[in-house]
Image (tube, rainbow, N blue to C red):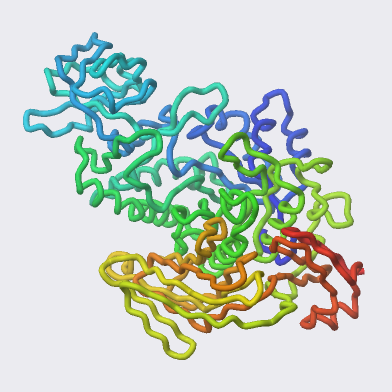
Amino acid sequence: MFNEHYPKAIYFRNVENSAANTSISYEKWAKRWSKLDGMVVKALDEEIPRRSEEAQKKFIQYKKDNPEKLMLLHFNGNARDPNFDLTAFYPEDWTYFVGTYSADVISENDSDITVRDASVFRTLDDIAIVPVDLKGNLDWKNAEQAKLTAVSGKNKLTVNRGLFNTKIKTYAKGRAYLAAHVSQPAIAPGSDQALWRYNFTNITPQGGMPIRLTHNLMEYLGSDKSLSNFDGVEFDVLADIRGLKHPSRKTPIDYNYDGKASKLDVDHQQKYSQGVHLFLSSLRSELGKDKLILADGNEANQQREFSVLNGIESETWPSHWDPQVEQWSSGINRHLFWKSRSYSPSLNYIKLGKVPNKQGAAQSPPENLRRLRMAGSLFTDTVIAPAYRPKGKGIDNWSELIGDEKNYTTWLGKPLTDIQYLKPEHDDIVEFDIESKEMNFNENADLFTFKKINDKEINIALKFKLSNPGDITVTAEVSSSSMGKQKAKGRVSYITITPIGDGEQKNMTWSDAAPFNSRFYFKNLKKGQNSLTLASDADLVQLTNLRIQYGVEIPYRIFENGVVIANPSRKQVKVSTSKFSSIQSTLKKRGLKAKNLTINAKDAVFLSFE
């Protein structure tokens, strides 16, 4: 995985169902899934029951037989099935909605409970029943877990009590507090058990929930444990921070589990990222430097733990909800930033599967967008995880992965350049003005400095005129800094640039104290007056050599055995290989199979030397 030859590819969980099938021998399974450079797999039961049985045995044996191949554990970093290792946690290690109090006595035999306000629940909620002492304090240590089976009227609940080996108790009138778990629907086929969300804000002087999660994982990943030969772990849907509300209901989340909504919940919620940092840092300390730790990283609310994580998974690319690859620059900036800032060695991968659809089932992307995403991975030294079968192609024999061979091979060889850009046909520099409100703004030659005041997010406008409609690229060396608690953490910030009226083209980059070369490419801007909005959560942002250039952006990269060229624009372009001035000697020596190219809109070509 860490040599310099490309493309690199691994399997993404497509191996699991056959691995879990006891009728398929290990030999047959291993032979089928041996072509690529490794796999990312679900091998524990935190999300899908019975993955720690037959499937886990095959994964462990496969790693023993193929030590050079990558084996990463895929683990839900947001929530888990409470049937999996529940005793490793405390009741307050989970997140709950603000609940309600009982209105009558609850005996050990009662399955019907009268409460003050049943509207805070939904049928089939998992709920905690918490004893209330004489002072009104909630005794979470002795909470009982239950399933809500019916809601009748405004104050009647029917529950199945004493679940998950918790003790059924008797509660005096008004001395029970009932709260619903913040959860997500069951993922495993045939399962109806919701997954309970972790409460990373539950930090104590002894460590709290984050440390308990570390200790739980080390029971599997630690030395001489069942998964000790795995190369590391990838945390799925592990957010940097979570909000105070949940889309499933209007009831707020009670982050400090005191039974009411207040400003204290806001204070606790702000500790979420601290809890995530504590968890990942403690896991890094326990696992050591030779194991890989990755997490989801293709959204703004996902991971910023660059000092701890080796890299990210991008589920789809550039973003989970960018089916048309309008945010091309975001994907390039994000992966190059992780490559340069992550814990060493850096390893990022892109899952190239069906594309999420808010209106229905995920859909296979058009072939041109699949190729464009693959080009993005090759421009940023990113591993490809093919996760679906395009028409006429197997999951591990896409033409871009096999070159002219029959099977997967690193046919492109070593990269000879970083990502490069063809000189636009019209190499015009666009003049612009900057408008800023409610912040300090200093311009010093090629350096622009923006400092927020009154604790408001940095938000400025770049205004310019185009003599003709077309595409532009904004380039700058960006750096930023934060104050207070954020500075103490060494926390990175985001910078976004968005054309006014076109949120689909919102592009971002991460930034920190060291300058980072960023690009923001925008398509089909109108003739005449235009405006871009730059926003950041940093306290101070500096932009050096800020430029706006007119013209279509055509990125490319040269490898030992070929060239990859992409066209992220919305229109077809024609390219002559004579434009590759930086590598003319190489091209003349080896020659390309294509001299003049027509590249369709949002597409890429993969060319080998003759």
Picture coordinates of residue 306 (x, y %)? 47, 63
Which of the two residues, 279 or 298, is positioned nearer the viewer here?
Answer: 298
Place residue 89 in its image quadrant: top left
* Vertical comparison of 548 with 497: above or below: below
Image quadrant where residue 145 sits: top left
In percent of width and height, residue 65 lies at 70, 44
How many numbered tags mark residues here? 0
Regarding residue 501, the answer to whether it shows in the image is yes
Query: If the image is split into quadrants, where does the N terminus sit?
Result: bottom right
Where's the C terminus, which quadrant? bottom right
Farthest residue, direction left:
134
Instruction: Tell me: residue 215, above or below residue 444.
Output: above
Tell me if residue 185 comes above or below residue 257 in the rendering: above
559 sits to left or right of 458: right
**Residue 341 placed where, x, y %?**
51, 68
**514 or 62: nearer the eye?**
514
Whether residue 63 is visible, yes or no, is no
The residue depicted at 35 percent of the width and 47 percent of the height is: 243
Farthest residue toward the top?
A: 109
At a point 62% along the width and 34% down the height, the residue shown is: 361
User: Residue 533, percent across and down?
Assistant: 47, 67
The residue at 55%/83% (across/down) is 431
Tell me: 45 left or right of 199. right
In this picture, residue 134 sits left or right of residue 349: left
The residue depicted at 71 percent of the width and 79 percent of the height is 426
